[in-house]
Image (cartoon, grey):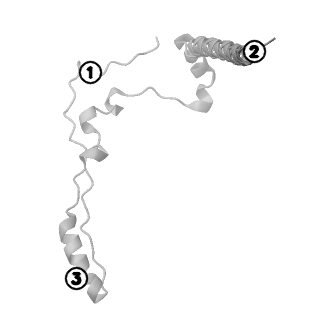
Amino acid sequence: MLKTFDLVLIGVMTATAAVTYTIKHRAELKLEEVHRLEAEIKLEEDTIDLLKADWALQSQPNRLERLVKAYDDELQLQPTQSTALVHAKELPMLKSEVPVPDVTEAKAGAKGASLAGATVATKAQPVPKPAPRAEPEDDADEIETGSVE
């Protein structure tokens, strides 16, 4: 009664149903994982917000001033003088700005020296010095700093 074509269609339908169920199950598992990750992200964001609020409380100038007064004998803190601050032009050169040593002479000398068994001394580069600082004016301060009154 059943033709082979009907049996093939029943087999295809069963296989399709099994594949559909497998895909649906995997999608549900991925959805659960997405919800779990969203919950973890929310927890981390809440933790960051809490830490920011805690930092705001801990770094209040009035609180810090009370702590400085309470532990003045042990800490012996002194206010920073405006002349103790460094301007950007006084900083040493960046590593990228340091001149590169001339290696062509060293390579040529190394070939001849390696044959003779001697070592080649390389030229030392000078250490960069900070630019001289201009005398500050009495009333003008280039750097604004916060202070606690």
Specify the quadrant of the image occupied by residue 141: top left
Closer to the N terminus: mark 2 or mark 1? 2
Q: Position of residue 58 (x, y in %)?
A: 60, 16
Q: Nearer the viewer, mark 2 or mark 3?
A: 2
* Secondary structure under the numbered disc 3 in the rendered image: helix
Q: CA distance from mark 2 to mark 3?
A: 93 Å
Q: Which residue is mark 2?
A: 3
- Image: 11 above or below 125: above
For the N terminus, which image quadrant?
top right
* Secondary structure under the numbered disc 1 in the rendered image: loop
Dot 1, crowdedness within 10 Å: few (<14), some or many (≥20)?
few
Q: Which residue is mark 3?
A: 112
Q: Amino acid at mark 2?
A: Lys
> Left or right: where does residue 30 sit relative to residue 98?
right
Q: Position of residue 132 (x, y in %)?
A: 20, 41
Q: Nearer the viewer, mark 2 or mark 1?
A: 2
> Left or right: where does residue 58 sit relative to residue 118?
right
